[in-house]
Each structure stands twice: as C-alpha cells, then as structure tokens.
Amino acid sequence: SNPEHFELYRGLQEEWWGYDIYSRIGLTFWFSHWLTAASLYSMCHIFGELRCLWPAWTVVPCFVAAHYGILQLDIVRPKEGSFMPPIEKVIPFVPFLAVLGMSIDYSVMDPTPFWQGVVYTLSWICYSIQFLWALRLYDLARPRHRSKDAPEVPGVAWAPKEWPIPPAFENSVYLLSAPKYLEPGQTCLTQEMKAAKGSKGQSVPQKLARESQHAMLPWKLFRGTIITTCGMWFFRDHKLAAFAVIIAVGLCSDRKPSKNTSTSPSATAVLQARAKELLSVTPSQL
C-alpha cells in the first residue's frame, strides 16, 4: 500500500495546486501581451516623437523573436483537446503588420483612398488576430480531465489525474506531487514500524487522502479575465469597422459634392495641406 503521508499530503495539495499552476500560466500570458505592447510602444515613440522610419524595423524583430520563443517554450502540447488553430504561431508577428501600416501612414506619400484602405486593412488584420489570440488563450488554459495517470518518469513534471491541468501547460507543474506507489527497492519507515508491531500494527486503519473539491477558483478568475479580454477585442474590431464606414462615406461625399453647396475644400484636401505644412517645418522652427 502507499505510505500514509503520501496520501495525506496529496489531499492537502488539492487546496493550492490550482493557484500555483495558473499563476505560472498567467505569467506566460502576461509576457505575451507585454511584448506586443512594448513593440507597439516603441513604434509610437519612434514614429511619433523621433520621426524616424528604419529604427522601428530594427527594434520590432527583437520583441517578435522573444515573443515567439517564449510561446514555443511554454506551450508544450497545443493540439490535444483543442478546438482552435495554433494562433500562437502567428500572434508574435502582428507588430510587423503594425509597423508596415505606420510606415505607410507616416510616409511622404499622398493619403489617397487606396493607401488609407491599406492601412485600415492592416489594422483589421491585427485586431482580428488579437481577438483570435484571446479565444486561443481560453482554449489553452481551460482545464482537462484525464482518465488515467501519466507514467512517472524521473526528471519530468508529473501530476495525478485528479488535477485537471491544461495539457498545453504540463511543464507549469513545479509542485512536488506525492506519488501513488513506492518505487521498487524503496521502503517506508512508518510501514516498517507497523509491521514490527505485528497484529497490533495491522489493526490500525490505513489513512487515505481526504476527499475535497479541486482548487478551481484560480481558473474561474482566469476565465473571467480572458472573457473580458475577448470582449475588449471584439468591441475594438466593431468600433474600427464602424469608423472605417464613416471615413468611406465621408470620402464618397467629398468626391460627389452637391450642386447647392459652396466650393469649400474637402476634408481630405485640408488634411493633405496640414500634413504638408507639418512636413515642411524645420527643427529650428520648433
């Protein structure tokens, strides 16, 4: 039989294993969002304040490479029980689309409807990938119930089947899980002391792990955060689409002025004139 202290300790671990594992999963998700945000912040600083172009294309690959490497190291079994494609292969490259759109937007080219459409299309692609990544986070982090225990291998993370750990983050198990049996050649001092007492020691009932609920509160909190993230990206996608429709309607109205209106300059012409004024300003005039 399994030693009593193994069973008792495994029963106690039901109270905190979820907090330990989902805190590590949360760190992975946090780094994913932070690296994307850092690359976007660098672009805004370089384009908006430094008024440079090529430095943005040299800074972004550093964050993209780090993002891709972290996701590949932490997500070990992404396909098991999944209902979504591997968005983690695509999400690190979103900043490249953003820096391409900002390069066009801050270039000296005339802001024609074609290039405006290109910038908006790149924005929609970035927002759509971020929304799919938020759904993928839910898919990767949701707990999975297993029917049998995985074989115990020395040096490899192991957890009992009673813990519904996401397969994609099996390497996030840093807890010392109590085994369910002794290895060949191992002995338990408590069992030896009972055996030395003969019939008196055998009359003491074997203590087992107490039945308790899984520590699923961390997953419930985590699930609420991911659902909020999905709603945020969904709202941004629709807001961007509505704004693009308004811009398109405005451009069409500028092309077809009414006969009763005066010949005032269009909004596009005003923006073009203002952009040329800003580009003509020298550093000494600032």
Image (cartoon, helix red, strand yellow):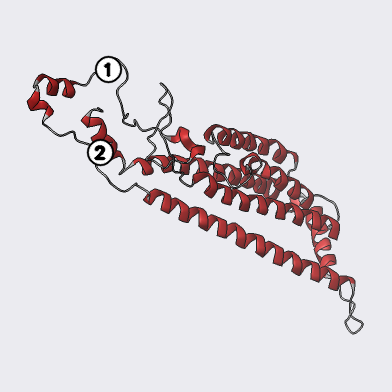
Look at mark 1 in the image and give the residue it sits on. 186
Residue 66 horizontal side relative to residue 206, left or right: right
Tell me the SS state at disc 1: loop
Query: Outermost residue toward the bottom?
Result: 260
Residue 3 horizontal side relative to residue 100, left or right: left
Q: In this view, does 25 lie above or below 107?
A: above
* Residue 206 in picture, x, y percent from top left: 18, 33
Residue 42, by quadrant, is top right
**In percent of the image, x 89 and y 70: which residue is there?**
255
**In percent of the image, x 32 and y 20: which residue is there?**
183
Query: Outermost residue toward the right?
Result: 259
- Tell me the crowding category of disc 1: few under 14, some 14 to 19, or many 20 or more residues within 10 angstroms, Cα based: few
**In percent of the image, x 45 and y 45: which residue is there?**
143
* Residue 220 in picture, x, y percent from top left: 42, 53
Asked if the residues shown at circle 2 and circle 1 are in contact, with their CB atoms under 8 angstroms apart, the answer is no
* Residue 109 in picture, x, y percent from top left: 85, 52
**In percent of the image, x 41 and y 34: which residue is there?**
173
Q: Earlier in the sequence, mark 2 or mark 1?
A: 1
* Residue 146 in picture, x, y percent from top left: 44, 40
Q: Distance between the residues labelled 2 and 1?
A: 21 Å
Look at mark 2 in the image and give the residue it sits on. 209
Can you see residue 51?
Answer: no
Name the residue type under label 2. Ala
Residue 72, by quadrant, is top right
Q: Is residue 99 above or below residue 115?
A: above
Name the residue type under label 1. Gln
